[in-house]
Amino acid sequence: MKAKRLRELTRDELEIKLRDLQEELQNIRLRSSLKQEGNPLRMRELRRGIARARTMLHEDNRGIRRLASGKEKA
C-alpha cells in the first residue's frame, strides 16, 4: 500500500490495517512452509506495507508528522 493512502487513515484505521497485514503475512509464511503456496513478491509487499504503517505510527507518536483525524472523514 502506498504511503499517501496510509497517511489518509486515522490512527485506529492504521492500527487495524497493520494487524491485517501482519495476519496476511503470517498466513502466507505458513502456507509457504507447507509448500502450498509461496509468492515472494506478495511477501515483500506485505513486509514493506507493515514497515510503512509502523513508521507512520511512530512518526505520529513522536509528533514528526500527524495522521489524519477522524473529523475530516464524513
Image: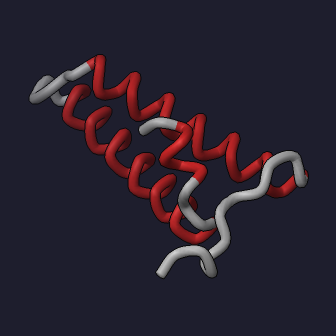
Q: Quadrant of residue 63?
A: bottom right
Q: Nearer the viewer, residue 20 or 31?
A: 20
Extreme residue toward the left, this view: 36
Q: In this rendering, would 12 be left or right of 31?
A: right
Q: Residue at x 67, y 71 (%)?
A: 69
Q: In this rendering, would 68 be left or right of 3?
A: right
Note whether 1 is above or below 44 in the view shown.
Answer: below
Q: Nearer the viewer, residue 5 or 49?
A: 5
Q: Residue 6: x percent and y percent?
A: 53, 49
| Quadrant location, the N terminus | top left
The colour mode here is secondary structure
Q: Residue at x 87, y 46 (%)?
A: 64
Q: Quadrant of residue 33?
A: top left
Q: Nearer the viewer, residue 35 or 61?
A: 61
Extreme residue toward the top, this view: 40
Q: Residue 53: x percent and y percent?
A: 59, 45
Q: Residue 57: x percent and y percent?
A: 70, 52
Q: Residue at x 44, y 47 (%)?
A: 22
How many callouts does the rendering have? 0
